[in-house]
Image (cartoon, rainbow, N blue to C red):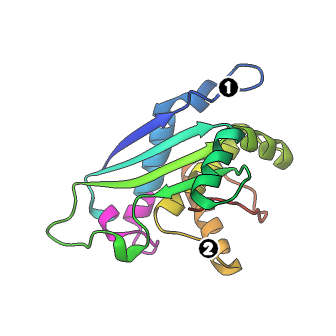
Amino acid sequence: MELDLAFDSKALTLNDGATGELVDEGIWAGELSLWIETMRMDPSISCPSCLRMADEVSLGLRFTDDATIRELNGAWRQRDESTDVLSFANLDGESNWPSAGSHEPACVELGDIVISLDTAARQAEEHQHSLGHELRWLVSHGLLHLLGWDHPDDASLQAMLSQQERLLENGGSVQSHCVRTVDAEL
């Protein structure tokens, strides 16, 4: 599987001006490719059938600030507040994904993940881990939303957080087993 990643990190600047690997598109492409392959190859994981068979997967990842994500949250979710991550899924629900079969699409467009660096930095400090760790946590959460995962109740939230743990273990960045509230849906 090939990943076509539209990566926007223009807004990604840290207080000290250093960004390092956080703005490296190649690192994010590698991490996302690994996570998507994990989902595709394990039949026990809930994953759209068209993704399992796709030759290419396309998605967008954008780092922004609180003001921009607040505008997006207001426009798309009618919530006048900033948030940590928004996911804009291209297809909504398994019934809307292309069906498996001989006419399987060569490329599947998943949608876009938008993350507020401001909020991520605050959350990283609150949870006492690195900004890179927090961003991986938020990107993995956004990816699961693009793949149809949601958390309307405690049981589905726990299932989603467990899957995030599994993805992050594959990338070598394990989140502690504390329950966190994550506001990442659209």
Occupied quadrant, residue 182: bottom right
Q: Position of residue 94 (x, y in %)?
A: 39, 74
In this view, the residue in front, 47 or 167, is 47
Give the answer, above or below, for where 72 lies relative to 89. Answer: above
Report helix, strand or loop for mark 1.
loop
Q: Earlier in the sequence, mark 2 or mark 1?
A: 1
Q: Amino acid at mark 2?
A: Ala
Location of residue 17 with respect to 73 vertically, above or below: above
Query: Which of labels 2 and 1 is toward the front?
Result: 1
Secondary structure of residue under mark 2: helix
Up-down relation of residue 52 to residue 123 (above or below): below
The one nearer the camera, 16 or 129, is 16
Which residue position holds label 1?
13
Considering every residue shown, the one lying at the far left of the view is 102
Residue span colored magenta: 38-51
Contact (Cβ within 8 Å) of mark 2 with mark 1? no
Quarter of the figure with residue 120: top right
Question: Horizontal and vertical percent for residue 123?
Answer: 79, 47
Observer-nearest residue: 27 or 65?
A: 65
Q: Which residue was labeled with disc 2? A: 159
Q: Amino acid at mark 1?
A: Thr
The stretch drawn in magenta includes residue 46: yes
Q: Residue at x 45, y 44 (%)?
A: 60
Q: Residue drawn at (62%, 77%), measured in percent from left and top?
A: 156
Circle number at residue 88: none
**In the image: residue 53, left or right of residue 10:** left
